[in-house]
Image (tube, rainbow, N blue to C red):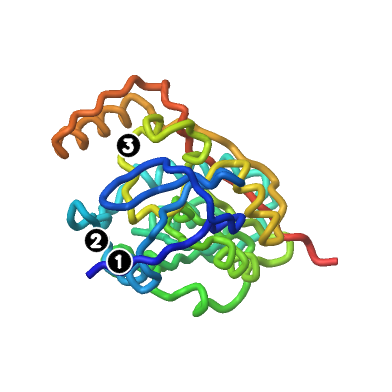
Amino acid sequence: MLIVMYTHCPLCGNDDASPWARENGFEMGKCRICGLLYVNPRPSDAEISDSNRVGVHRGEDGALDVRSHYKASKKARYSKVIHELFGADWAEGKPISWLDVGAGYGEVVAAVRDIAPEGSTVSGIEPMQPKVRKAQEMGLPVTTQSLDDITGQFDVISLINVYSHVPDFLGFGEALAAKLNPGGVLFVETGNGADLASRDQFPDLLYLPDHLVFTAPSQMRMTFDKIGLSLDRYEEKPVDSLIWCLKTAVNSALRGKLQLQIPGRSPFRTVFYKARKPAAA
């Protein structure tokens, strides 16, 4: 039996949300105070942890399998993005330490290893065991260690499309910030779902309850302030390219409900954030 728990807004603590969407037996509401989108009630902490380890979530519509596979195109994409956002920081060639949290199959780890200054250390942690096994088979330094198991400090900690999977990001964010070196950067990618006027503007399935929380730049500013980081920079990028729209159409047809979209029309964006820990006094 799926065990659920009632919760409140994980950003501002408010317990009043307006209905926003329903999918797979779960309700997602929009906080009337800060605008964050969050699932309520949500699976219990134990259920979330177990599902993340195996890559399968339970819902009203059956099992939601999110194991996916290694994507070389993903590595290429993040090589370009990371060079764009960190290239100037690395101009002097000083080695850096980078931890990718929620590393998946290791595409981001592989991308950073290829472009970081010589002598840098790059590693990743990931709870989903099938992904870790595949990453290790490919020679990538990805383990199933939890954040609590990680020792040492890092110049950069990345969270690539992980935010939405974390039910209470403030506590987790504080733990991440504690593992940054003074002046270190928390690098986050997540969508701007909380900016959308309605569910109809979201261009795909919500994938509940794998996704639990949707944010946007205004909520992320609040989040970084609460965990003691300052937002250096953020960039919004569209996701609805022609190729993306074609893939979405095919996937929706396979689910039995064809969904056609015109490239470049969706207000949904993926957003990259660089938030910095204060330098040592």
The residue at the point 41 percent across, 56 percent down is 40
The amino acid type of the residue labelled 2 equals: Arg
Q: Which tag is nearer the camera, tag 2 or tag 3?
A: 2
- Of residue 204 and residue 23, the one placed in the foreground of this image is 23
Q: Quadrant of residue 93?
A: bottom right
Q: In this view, does 172 lie above or below 252?
A: below
The amino acid type of the residue labelled 1 equals: Ser
Residue 156 spot, x, y in % from top left: 60, 59
Using a 10 Å C-alpha cutoff, classify the residue at mark 1 as few (fewer than 14 neighbours), some (14 to 19) or many (20 or more): many
Q: Which of marks 2 and 1 is nearer the N terminus?
A: 1
Left or right: 15 as drawn, with respect to 241? right
Circle 3 is placed at which residue position?
204
Q: Disc 2 to disc 1, how far (Cα)? A: 8 Å
Q: Are marks 2 and 1 in contact (CB under 8 Å)?
A: yes
- Secondary structure at badge 2 equals loop
Residue 51: which disc? 1
Q: Earlier in the sequence, mark 1 or mark 3?
A: 1
The residue at the point 45 percent across, 58 percent down is 109
Q: Earlier in the sequence, mark 2 or mark 3?
A: 2
Residue 4: which disc? none
- Secondary structure at badge 1 equals helix
